[in-house]
Amino acid sequence: MARKEIKSEITGSVWKILKQPGDAVGDEDALMILESMKMEIPVLAEMSGTVAEIRVKENDAVSEGQVLAVLDA
């Protein structure tokens, strides 16, 4: 089974989590929305599969390169 870590491309905070562990996702589906400098940036699935883990909570501060979620194919 392929496993993919989804990492933050920005430093900011988690505004809204859209998917939960066990949810099926398609390639490019939004997993969550980050907020940075009053801009909303969607975090997209990089493959189709199932959400294995969400490693952050809403309102958490995140750093660039931090693992936000894990997907299983």
Image: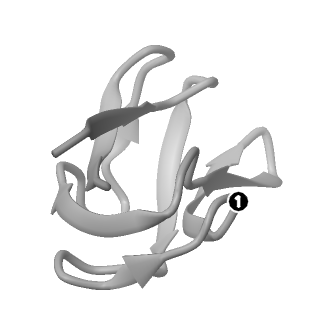
Identify which amino acid the numbered label 1 is placed on: Glu
* As drawn, 4 above or below 57: above
* Residue at (33, 36) in percent of width and height: 4
Give x and y (percent) for residue 67.
30, 30
* Residue at (51, 30) in percent of width and height: 8
Give x and y (percent) for residue 42.
70, 57
For the N terminus, give its image quadrant. Answer: top left
* As drawn, 6 above or below 73: above
* Residue at (55, 54) in percent of width and height: 45
Judge from the rendering whether residue 71 lies leftward or rightward of residue 22; answer left or right: right
Outermost right residue: 39
The quarter holding residue 5 reads top left
* Residue at (43, 20) in percent of width and height: 63
Of 1 and 4, nearer the camera is: 1
Tell me if I can see residue 58 in this picture.
no
Say how the picture is coloured: one colour
Of 7 and 60, nearer the camera is: 7
Q: Which residue is mark 1?
A: 28
For the C terminus, give its image quadrant. Answer: bottom left
Judge from the rendering whether residue 39 lies leftward or rightward of residue 27; answer left or right: right
Asked which secondary structure carries label 1, the reply is loop
Give x and y (percent) for residue 24.
38, 82
Tell me if I can see residue 68 in this picture.
yes
Of 27 and 1, nearer the camera is: 1
Q: How many marks?
A: 1
* As drawn, 18 above or below 5: below
Crowdedness of circle 1 by 10 Å Cα count: few (<14), some, many (20+)?
few
Outermost front residue: 1
